[in-house]
Image (spheres, rainbow, N blue to C red):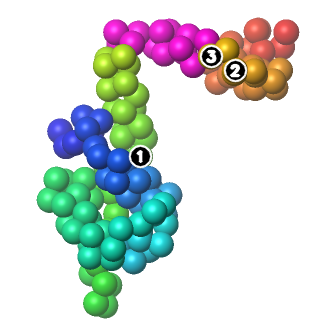
Amino acid sequence: MNRLEQGQMSRRERQIMDILYRLGKASAKEVLENLPDPPSYSAVRALMATLEGKGMVKHSKESRRYIYQPVVAETKARKSAISNLLSTFFEGKPEKLVAALLDSEDMKLEKEEVVRIREALGDDDQAER
C-alpha cells in the first residue's frame, strides 16, 4: 500500500496528485503552471521523481518530455483518504463525520442542497418532503 492509499501525503504531493487527477496526465511544466504559489521548475521535477519513487505516479516519455500520470485510480484514492479521515478523527463512524460536517454554526444549507444530499444517500422519500 503506497502513501496515497494510506492517506499520508504532504501538501505539495496532494496538490500535484489533484492536478494529475484533473488533467489525467501532465508534464512537470504543466504541473508547475497549475500549482498555487509554485516552487521552481527543478523542485517540481524533483517532487515528481519522488512521487514516482513512492509508487504514486508513473511516467512515459513523449519526445524529450516525461509525462506523469497517477498510478492509483482517483476513486480508490478518495475512498482511502475518507477511510483514513474516519479512522483518525471519527472513530471509524461515517455518521460522526456527517454530523461534524452539518454541525457547523455558519453552515446554512439551501433546500435544494438538502434534497441533493438526501438523494445521494438514497433517501428518496425524504427528498420529496
Q: CA distance from mark 2 to mark 1?
A: 30 Å
Give residue 97's position: percent from left, percent from top: 48, 15
**For the residue marked with disc 3, what is the amino acid?**
Ser
Span of residues in magenta: 90-103
Q: Nearer the viewer, mark 2 or mark 1?
A: 2
Q: Residues within 10 Å of mark 3 (few under 14, many from 20)?
A: few
**Lower sequence index among marks 2 and 1:** 1
Circle 2 — which element?
loop
Q: Are marks 2 and 3 in contact (CB under 8 Å)?
A: yes
Can residue 27 be seen here? Answer: no
**For the residue marked with disc 2, what is the amino acid?**
Asp
Give 65 or 119, whichever is nearer the viewer. 65
**Lower sequence index among marks 1 and 3:** 1
The quarter of the picture where residue 2 lies is top left
Circle 3 — which element?
loop
Which residue position holds label 1? 74
